[in-house]
């Protein structure tokens, strides 16, 4: 089984639970709040909980938020490649979760936005590794250029999985095109898919269009309905989701991505891996908080019961 190698961002999440977003100029009182490391950490933790070794190759800083990031990385058991930056703090994200469980984000960028090609050259890839690329990292000019350039040197034996993120419509087209062309799997949610393929009439069509711009394989997560899959130019297939009572959708995509990569790393076929990832994401949304990916045993139990 290979490793998940993340070149994404680990930042601090400041999560606030509210009834509804305020009107412009207004104010609301949060029902609850928490401060925790998040971003790309959630995908890595999901893969770790599903039994995969993880390497973090992103950048991080020094300061109050950097301390939270460093502590979380140490506690998660991932291998950290970079020494960190001594003169800048890590960034943070304010996540507003409303009564419908919908999430709204505002992010302040820190050291994670300064990942260079020299940093990436520290990564020692193995043939059976999976590199995970996030649009959150590609949105930073330094990171985006470095990652797109570095991916050209990644051996064909290494799988590349990319997630365009909600920032997909702000990514430099040349950067996203280069990353997409090297991606063995592109995994997007429904909003991202519509932005990537605005002329597609359905999510099935959008999945096929995204796959054609990559190496033939794409996934589009459609919430509780499941996940559309196009593999090697085949017709789109909907892998059904698992009905649950959602409490918080924050981190569901991260749980899906981490468990998907772990299952693929064990040699599962794509549709089987997606079904397992759907189950993990379903369990994740039944729990409050961004880092709610289930253990492998919990995912196994839901799959066995379904």
Image (cartoon, rainbow, N blue to C red):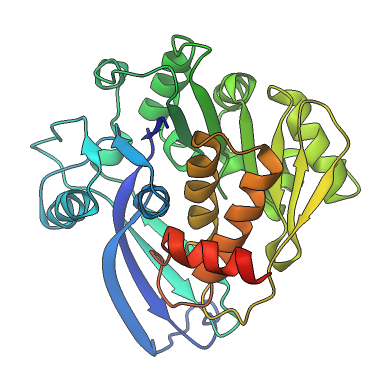
Q: Is residue 198 visible?
A: no
**Can you give x and y, in whole percent of width and height, for residue 300 in the image?**
53, 62
Q: Nearer the viewer, residue 141 or 193?
A: 193
In the picture shown, does residue 46 fall above or below 167? Answer: below
Q: Residue at (34%, 50%) from the top-left corner?
A: 41
Q: Nearer the viewer, residue 305 or 133?
A: 305
Q: Residue at (38%, 48%) from the top-left corner?
A: 51
Q: Locate residue 88: give its quadrant.
A: top left
With 102 as the anchor, is 26 left or right in this view? left
**Can you give x and y, in whole percent of width and height, for residue 142 in the image?**
36, 26
- Total numbered labels: 0
In the picture shown, does residue 46 fall above or below 286? Answer: above
Q: Nearer the viewer, residue 190 or 143?
A: 190
**Can you give x and y, in whole percent of width and height, for residue 166 in the image?**
57, 50
Name the quadrant of the N terminus.
top left
Farthest residue, direction right: 201
**Can you give x and y, in whole percent of width and height, for residue 35 in the image?**
26, 70
In the picture shown, does residue 64 fall above or below 35? Answer: above
Q: Is residue 108 visible?
A: yes
Q: Locate residue 276: give its quadrant.
A: bottom right
With 119 as the anchor, is 268 left or right in this view? right
Q: Residue at (10%, 51%) from the top-left corner?
A: 63
Name the quadrant of the C terminus.
bottom right
Farthest residue, direction front: 304
């Amino acid at each position: 089984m290979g490793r998940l190698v993340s070149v994404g961002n680990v930042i601090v999440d400041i999560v606030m639970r509210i009834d509804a977003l305020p009107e412009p100029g207004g104010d609301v009182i949060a029902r609850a709040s928490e401060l925790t490391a998040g971003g790309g950490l959630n995908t890595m933790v999901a893969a770790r909980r599903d039994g995969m070794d993880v390497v973090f190759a992103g950048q991080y800083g020094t300061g109050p938020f950097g301390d939270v990031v460093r502590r979380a990385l140490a506690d998660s058991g991932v291998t950290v490649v970079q020494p960190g930056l001594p003169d800048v703090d890590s960034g943070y994200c304010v996540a507003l979760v409303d009564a419908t469980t919908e999430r709204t984000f505002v992010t302040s960028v820190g050291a994670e936005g300064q990942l260079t090609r020299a940093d990436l050259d520290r990564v020692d890839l193995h043939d059976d590794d999976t590199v995970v690329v996030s649009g959150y990292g590609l949105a930073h000019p330094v990171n985006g250029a470095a990652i797109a350039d570095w991916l050209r040197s990644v051996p064909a034996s290494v799988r590349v999985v990319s997630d365009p993120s909600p920032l997909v419509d702000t990514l430099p087209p040349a950067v996203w095109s280069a990353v997409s062309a090297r991606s063995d799997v592109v995994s997007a949610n429904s909003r991202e898919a519509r932005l990537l393929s605005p002329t597609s009439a359905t999510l099935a069509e959008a999945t096929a269009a995204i796959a054609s711009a990559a190496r033939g394989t794409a996934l589009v997560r459609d919430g509780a309905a499941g996940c559309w899959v196009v593999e090697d130019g085949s017709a789109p297939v909907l892998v059904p989701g698992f009905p649950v009572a959602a409490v918080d959708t924050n981190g569901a995509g991260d749980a899906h991505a981490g468990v998907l990569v772990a299952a693929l790393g064990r040699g599962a076929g794509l549709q089987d891996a997606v079904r397992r990832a759907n189950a993990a994401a379903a369990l994740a949304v039944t729990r409050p908080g961004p880092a709610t990916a289930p253990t492998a045993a919990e995912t196994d139990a839901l799959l066995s019961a379904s």
